[in-house]
Amino acid sequence: MSDNIPFEIQVEIVRRLPVKSLLQCRSVSKAWKSLIDSSPFIAGYNGQMQHLLVQYTCVDFKKKYVSIVDNDNFPKQKVSMNLPLLVKKLKSPGLTGSSHGLLCLNGSGDNPDTDMAVIWNVSIRKAVAVVIPNVGFEIYETNLYETNLGFGVCRVTLDPKIIKITHFNGYANMRGISRDETVDPWQVQVFAVSTWSWRSPYNNLPRKSIKFGYSTIVIDGFLYWLAIDRFTLTGAIAKCNLIISFDITSEEFREVGLPNSLAHQCSRNMKISKLRESLVVLEHGAEANNAIFSVWMMGDGVPQLFTKLFTFNVNAPHGATIRGFRKTGEPIIEIVEDHGISKLVVYEPHSKQIDNLGCDGLDFFCQVHPYMETLLLLDQPDRNIL
């Protein structure tokens, strides 16, 4: 770039470049490298192009990762991902979530008794790994407890955090607990990249009667889980669905009530997702050879104010599930075919057109997470585990 252009103008030009070009610019001069590596530049950089990371399991049981650019040429710009070594080391890896361009995966490490999490910046090909601490309860070995993980980036500090929640597993533990009874919360731990340590928050911890599900999403600095509240009613165990939110900045939990039709729906027929930066509840069922989906959106972040946006169906005699949405709002659906094989498609509700994304694999072993290009983790030292 010409020396006649003021450096401040050069900064604004560089800030608009895609990540790949930015990384190349770091070798142009010491001044540019110092600029791009600086914390203010990293925090202020916002990539404009959305990608979809697809993780699926092939028929040979090998995990495959594909990145698809979500633009007008979708899905033509599709590439297989070159995984960092830390991700390759994970046994049975699953995607915990995505936030601010970072992806979090978890699985067992070299020691099968040790759980690991890897935070991965796909754009700059950098990853850091951390050991998930043991629950700390001797009774954990009896399977009375289970662990759920969440991942998100603080919208104020841009600090990536992993949230670990350990709670009772099984209805037998809830006998004698009334809905209004005050009970001790169970264990919650938060890992922050900035301090590289785990700690336990103490504000507004969830009640013991709440069982977290594995359907989770992060939106605008909040983590959401689909959960079940279990309580005794006239001597019997009753339950209702709700959503638990976690403010990644203040590290406080809140309960989000659902409309009656969703609160008392079978939880297996529900999941949560993100549609155009809003929280949605996906309700699914089946009729004849069709899978039926209803999409409910939470209005302006107001609890219990959910509106049914639309209902649609697809031909899927063997089953189907929504894996996410494009930025245009089109649902991405996994449709199960014969012999336990599934295909990933994009469904256009108005024309009812179905486009195959070419990610065929074992049924119900597929995940889709959107991500934007980011420089987060660029200024982090290379660390393997904690």
Image: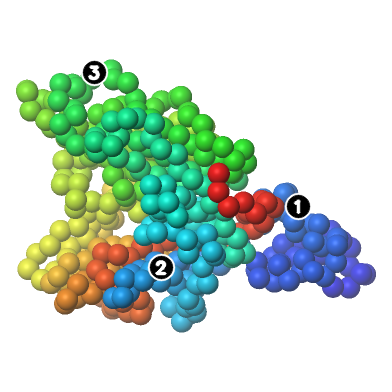
Mark 2 residue type: Val
The quadrant the C terminus occupies is top right
Tell me the SS state at disc 1: loop
Please tell me how crowded label 2 is: few (under 14), some (14-19), or many (20+) other residues with Cα within 10 Å: many
User: Mark 2 near mark 3, Cβ–Cβ under 8 Å?
Assistant: no
Q: Is residue 327 above or below residue 253?
A: below
Residue 213 appears left or right of 2 = left
Q: Is residue 33 above or below residue 59?
A: above
Q: Earlier in the sequence, mark 1 or mark 3?
A: 1
Please tell me how crowded label 3 is: few (under 14), some (14-19), or many (20+) other residues with Cα within 10 Å: few
Residue at x-position 84% and y-position 73%: 1
Q: Which dot marks residue 386?
A: none
Q: Earlier in the sequence, mark 2 or mark 3?
A: 2
Q: Which residue is mark 1?
A: 38
Q: Which residue is mark 2?
A: 54
Looking at the image, the residue that sits furthest to the bottom is 76
For the residue pair 3 and 261, the one nearer the viewer reads as 3
Please tell me how crowded label 1 is: few (under 14), some (14-19), or many (20+) other residues with Cα within 10 Å: few
Q: Earlier in the sequence, mark 1 or mark 2?
A: 1
Mark 1 residue type: Ser
Q: Position of residue 118 (x, y in %)?
A: 50, 54
Q: Which residue is mark 3?
A: 181
For the residue pair 294 and 150, the one nearer the viewer reads as 150
